[in-house]
Image (cartoon, rainbow, N blue to C red):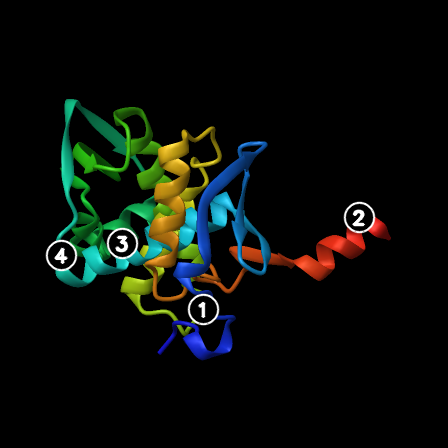
Amino acid sequence: ANEIPTQSVPIIDNSQVELKALQIHNQYIVTQVKSGLMLIDQKAAFERIFYEKYLKNLSQKSGNSQTLLFQKTVELEPLDFSLCMDIREKVSALGFVFEEFGKNTLLLSAVPVDLTDEDGEHILKDIIGQYRENENSQELSKTENLARAMAKRVASSSVKSLQNLEIQSLINQLFECSVPSLTPDGKATTHILGLKELSELISG
């Protein structure tokens, strides 16, 4: 049980979240709740959402792929290539489709639907590197390790301007997660400023 138990984090009632929300500097979402204001860290929220999605895909081997218009060769460091081959089945379950193409080289033909053609090669390299770093944690299974690595890398490209519908979709997806208040490695995704705290900030 490597997931942080829900009883150790603040419980946020989805029904408390109002529809009005505002994005700040492409990094934070501010939304009104009955007790005051909720601040959402956009990158952290996406990391939680993607983590649970990829964990499900890995468990069910159900990751969707999009075929690249042109296949790409991906050269890896020897250790990363060996690691990629070792966890090949799980990487494929995320939506990557590839085959060996010479020494320490892959031929990439499809990537997960969340990625663009341009991102696929770089993200594959990055998640292998992130996975290797996470291996130092003996508490993580291979599945959790890879889901974390993929979620962290994809979320890092999610710091961008969002339309109103995208903001609301982010909020809805976050509160559908099993642990909406924390990223997989325990960092807060949200912070609530209560009415009393807001009053004290303004009045001093």
Looking at the image, can residue 30 be seen?
yes
Give the image location of residue 132, x and y in percent. Answer: 40, 55
Q: Quadrant of residue 125?
A: top left
Secondary structure, mark 3, is helix
Q: Amino acid at mark 3?
A: Tyr
Secondary structure, mark 4, is loop
Looking at the image, can residue 98 be seen?
no
Q: Which mark is first along the chain, 1 or 2?
A: 1
Q: Nearer the viewer, residue 65 or 31?
A: 31
Q: Nearer the viewer, residue 150 or 13?
A: 13
- Which residue in the rendered view is the most extreme toward the front? 34
Compute the Cα span from label 4 to label 2. Answer: 51 Å
Q: Which mark is first along the chain, 2 or 4?
A: 4
Q: Amino acid at mark 1?
A: Ser
Q: Residues within 10 Å of mark 4 (few under 14, many from 20)?
A: some
Compute the Cα span from label 2 to label 1. Answer: 44 Å
Residue, x 27% and y 37% (percent of image)?
Answer: 114
The residue wearing badge 2 is 202
Compute the Cα span from label 4 to label 3. Answer: 10 Å
Q: Could you say which disc has been placed on residue 61 in the image? A: 4
- Which residue in the rendered view is the most extreme toward the top? 70
Secondary structure, mark 1, is loop
Q: Residues within 10 Å of mark 3 (few under 14, many from 20)?
A: many
Q: Could you say which disc has been placed on residue 54 in the image? A: 3
The residue wearing badge 1 is 137
Instruction: Tell me whether circle 4 and circle 1 mark residues in contact (CB < 8 Å).
Output: no
